[in-house]
Image: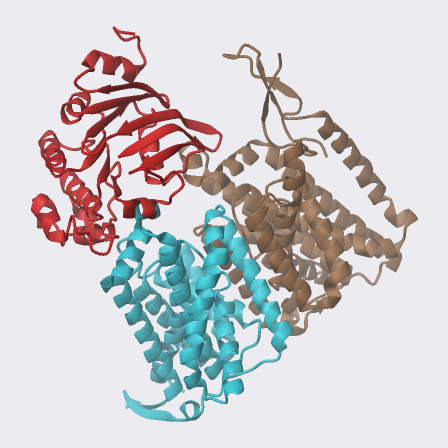
Chain colours: A red, B cyan, C brown
Amino acid sequence: MIEVDALDVHYGDFQALFGVSLSLARGRALALAGANGAGKTTLLRALMGAHLPSAGTVRYEGADVTALPPHDRVRRGIAMVPEGRRLFPSLTAEENIKVGAVRAASPDWPLARIYDFLPLAATVRDRRASALSGGERQAVAIARALASGPRLLLLDEISLGLAPGVVEQVYEVVRGLRESGATLLIVEQDLDRALGACDDVVCLLEGRVALTSETAAASREDVVAAYFGTEGPHS
Amino acid sequence: MNWVGAVVQGVLVGGWYALAACGLSLTFGIMRLVNIAHGDLAVCGAYLTLVLSSALGLPVGYTLPLVLPIAFAIGVALHLLLFGRALRGGPLAPVLVTFGLSVMIENLLVAGLSADPRSLDAGRLALAGVRVTAFGSVITLSWLRIAGFLTALAVLGGLHLLLARTSFGRLVRATSDDLDTARLVGVRVRPVFATVAGIAVATAALAGVFLGMTATFDPYAGGLSLIFAFEAVVIGGLGSLWGTLLGGVTIGLVQQLAAQWDVQYTVLAVHLLFFAVLAVRPQGFFPASEPEAA
Amino acid sequence: MTAGTGGGAVTAGTAAEGRFAVRRWSRTASVAAAGSVVAVAALAGVPYYAGTSAEQPLVTLFCLVALASLWNLMAGFAGLTSFGQQAYLGAGAYALYAAASMGLDPFAAIPLAAAAAGVLSLPVSFAVLRLSGGHFAVATWVLAEILRLAVTLAPSAGGNTGVSLPGVSGYDALLRQALTYWWALAVAVCSVAGVYALARSRFGLDARAVHSDPVAAASAGVAVGRTRRWAYCLSAFGTGAVGAVLFANTLYTQPGSVFGVQHSVAMMFMVVIGGIGTIEGPILGALVFFALQQALSGYGPWYLVLLGAAGIAITLFAPRGLWGSLAAPRGWSLFPIGHHISGTS
């Protein structure tokens, strides 16, 4: 579905990613783990085209999309739920979702199906985004991403700042998305949740890939070692 | 003239200020672009109308279906060539680029059409008036002023509907709220901004046409037009279209009331009011209550 | 033209154990400083060996250098683009008129005229600095319009027809022109040296921080408002001095021209074309502008169209300006203002 090969990303003189490679097959879910500043959000923004890499390639469904702008990638079926939800505060929830519906008629996710899938977004549809709670915002942000009819969803820090009960609901939604056949790339601080919800795990450490594995094959200790850059039991 | 008449005239004249200001308010509210050449583009609208109506032998009003689309296209082109680049060029670039554009426009007009003062012939509209009796005093209102005020109301109302009700308006408001996220969720920002710039220049050109019909203009009239438009925007409150209307009306009222005292002091009174507002209430009188464009 | 603070190399030998040094000075800078002193001394002698025909154009050039440096103090170091510096140009001129009318010697009163412009700028700064970017630019322009209209409407200030400078009839023409020349040179040198000293001081560091990111600067403890206010008021003070010198040079001033926005066009053009945020850039920009003015002003509006187009093109395609484009790739810096870290071993 998506193959990333030897990606370098710079912010001015500062290099944020060093030769990052990963691949994700259709229908699978990948957990992207790493400490703050490890480069997770940078990688997601590079996959989205919001920040162009200085070297390396990104291939999506067989085509080279490395230099495509974000709107072209969204039309090809990649969508992102950004960290902090980032709803448009002065728009209503439903307007936020409609902004995401850039492909005029998204056959996969019409508004009715989105509301069916995310009842919380339906109940707040006429409220201004600035007046929503954290959980409601997360539901609307996922709805906005779904409105473009994505086949690959990038979810950045989906449980950050949410109450435990709300996190449970969010992961309920993630399971639902997996059942619908979507391919997911999830950035998550909570390792146990990430490993529990995903098939594969990639751990970033200071801009480099420190671990690539199937979640079933990696022990928690391996991931923690890669996460903190300490010597793991098997290395 | 009397006090009641001054107030009514002030409100009507204020409509023109709002018309001149709404494009400035729009580009700042949505794109964070302060277009220093806005007043010069308004004056270009007046010259374009002058040239077209004399070349085609048409009355001023009939050239509008040509002038407004041309102005819109100029705005789109300016965004694609200059404004878009300037907005990516750091905080000083938009100011410097649009100031340079202002200098270019003024001097191109001088070179091409001379610095002589001109005016547009409004035909019967300029001569006809209506007499109204209000609060025991008789006021004569020119149809041209009334038409200018109604046009301003129609333009502001139309802009409001466009932003609040259409899918294009939704994209505009989303982009204005959060440019980076709008890009991330797939909004194509360039056409949105180019369209906004086109609308802004078209409204400026329309204001220029009314300026040409009610007063004389020369290539350097853009500076004062920009200043008045800017004062309306700041007095009304940055980023609010209806605030801009009220800011324009405030300027019109102050101007007409100052004229009751001494005609020489009208412009000075407006500038001093602007500084007073800036010192006392820099957010303006009617600021946008939420970060939105309409 | 020496540094205000911190000449020489300061070794940062804490954690890095002397492997790195912070340099604020260089051999080129020493040569440039010595050269500047020699050049200023040579220029100061012009009235003795070159006469008035050389003085006149140089007075114009010195005033341009001063105006460009002062505009750059705001735009290049504090991120403030003013289109209203002509307000202080006129304030300086009319303050000189007022002082000379009261019987003061016009040349002795030039510092007073500058001070008057500086004092005026302080209350104004509290209003205009509430805005930033393009809004600040237009608000300062409004101030210039207020002063223009106020002078036009005041018969005691000559009204629309303008005023002649009183109190110069006692001077011999040669001496008067030489005094004007020295004042112009002094104002230019003080403007450049003053901006240079400020740029190297704590103020310069704060101002560059404010310029690049006001929010981050504020959170790092930089008093953003105070830094901007200093830049604005000092620039007004210097611009007032230039206004007084120009008045002393032409002996006549008129509200329509001294308060005209074309002065801001010139200031912006000189700074942008020379190189914003450097000491050398505005000087180079003033030289280029002066040369263009001499060569092309006969073309009238087309000359200004060219200026506008050049300003746009440089802002968009070579934002470092002539000096930045020439010097930065080669590491030249005649008047270094930054902190350069280099390995010492």
Q: Is residue C140 visible?
A: no
Note whether A121 is above or below C198 in the view shown. Answer: below
Residue furthest out toward the front? A62
Q: Is residue B179 visible?
A: yes
Residue at image position (67%, 22%) is: C8
Along the line of sight, which residue is nearer the eye, C144 or A163?
Answer: A163
Residue at image position (42%, 56%) is: B279
Along the line of sight, which residue is nearer the eye, B119 or B245?
Answer: B119
Count of numbered circles on the image? 0
Note whether A82 is above or below A206 in the view shown. Answer: below
Along the line of sight, which residue is nearer the eye, A123 or A200?
Answer: A200
Where does the image place residue B238, in percent across and percent down from the top left?
36, 58
Where does the image place residue C318, in percent across and percent down from the top left?
59, 46
The N terminus of chain C appears in which quarter of the rendering? top right
Where does the image place residue A76, in percent across and percent down from the top left?
28, 45
The C terminus of chain C appears in which quarter of the rendering? top right
Q: Quadrant of residue B294?
A: bottom left
Q: Quadrant of residue B104?
A: bottom right
Residue at image position (18%, 25%) is: A199
Whether residue B86 sits left or right of residue C187 in the image: it is left
Whether residue C333 sits left or right of residue A52 in the image: it is right
Along the line of sight, which residue is nearer the eye, C139 or A163?
Answer: A163
Note whether B214 is above or below C55 in the view shown. Answer: below
Q: Quadrant of residue B205?
A: bottom left
Note whether C85 is above or below B106 in the view shown. Answer: above
Whether residue C246 sits left or right of residue B142 in the image: it is right
Residue at image position (77%, 59%) is: C294
Where does the image place residue B156, in percent across and percent down from the top left?
32, 70
